[in-house]
Image (spheres, rainbow, N blue to C red):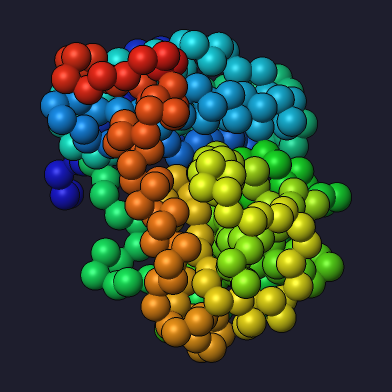
Amino acid sequence: MSQAPAEFVWLNGEIVPWDKATVHVFTHALHYGTGVFEGIRAYKAEDDILVFRLNDHIRRMVDSARIYGFALPYCEGEICKGVLDLIRRNNFRSSLYVRPIAFKGVGGISLDARATPISVSIIAIPYEKYFDPDKQGLDVCVSTWRRLGDPSVPAMAKACGHYINSVLARTEAAEAGFDEALFLDNNGNVAEGTGENIFLVKDDCIATPGISSNILRGITRETIMSIINDLEIPFTERTLARSELYTCEEAFLTGTAAEVTPILSIDRKLVGAGEPGPRTLQLQREYERLVSGRNPKYLGYLTPVYDTGRVQLKGTRS
C-alpha cells in the first residue's frame, strides 16, 4: 500500500488517523450516490495557508444537501472549523485540495433514504495542478454524452451520483486522445466541462453559459465574473451555440481544481492561434493574484489557517 497523502481525516466531528476513516460496504451512498460534496483550494502564501472562499463552498454544500432533503448533523460554522482544524492537525505547509463530503450511511436498500443517517467527512491533501502542468492548455472534445440536469436531476446540486455523467464523458475523451470533454445541454447548447465551467472570447467580449444550460453555479466562475467586471471587459451570460466553440478567439475553463485553464483546441480545431490568448492569460494572472492575497479588494475571500500575521488579511471570514 502506498503512503497515505495525509495523516488525519475529519470524520463526524472527530479527527481520526487516515486508515481509520472508513465506511461500511453497505453504505447507502456507495450503492446509490446519495451524497453531496465540495472541492476547496487552499494556497501557500508566505508562511501561512489561505483557504479560498471557505464559507461560500460550505454554504453551497449545505444548499446541495437541502435540495436533496438531507438534514446535515453539523452547521456551516462547524464544518468550516473542521476544515481549519484538520489542516492544522496535519501541519500542512503546502497548497492543498480540501474535500468535504456528506453522505447517507448504513440504513437498508430503500431508495427512500429519509431515515438513513448522514455522515460528514473532510479530507485535505497536498495538491498543485489538476491538468498537466507541462502543457500550455487543453485539447478538448465535445462529448457524445449530454450534461444531466433539470428536469431529471437538479443541476445546481453538487451531488455524488451526478458525477457518473462526468466519468462517462471524461473517459470517452481520454480514450480518444483528448485532455477534457465539453458537455452540451439537452437542447444542444454549450453547458460546461466534466468538472469546470467554460468561457469563450470573441471580439474582445467574454461569454459564458447561464444556469438554464444545466451548469453548476461555480464559485470560481463567479469569481472570474467579478474580475472581468473589475477590468471592465465586455461580458455576457447567455446561451451559447455549439458552433461558437469553433469560431471563438479564446476559450478557457474555470473550476476549483482547474483554476483558470486555457483551451487550445476543440474537436481538433484550433482555438484562435492554438495557444493561450491575452484575455485568458490576463484573467489567469489576476486569479493567481487574488488567491494569494495580493488583491486588496478580495481579501475577505481568504481564510488564513495559522494566522501567523505575515500575510496581512483584513475582513477574512472563517
Residue for point 64% across, 56% down: 234
Residue for point 19% across, 14% down: 309
Residue for point 54% across, 15% down: 76
Whole-percent x, y for residue 77 in the image: 49, 11
For residue 308, above or below residue 288: above
Horizontally, is 258 left or right of 74 in the view? left
Horizontally, is 7 left or right of 237 in the view? left
Q: Quadrant of residue 94?
A: top left
Q: Quadrant of residue 301?
A: top left
Whole-percent x, y for residue 108 in the image: 65, 31
| Rendered-image quadrant of the C terminus | top left
Of residues 216 and 147, the one drawn nearer to the viewer in this rendering? 216
Whole-percent x, y for residue 18 in the image: 25, 30
Whole-percent x, y for residue 202 in the image: 62, 72
Horizontally, is 252 left or right of 104 in the view? left
One can see residue 235 in this view: yes
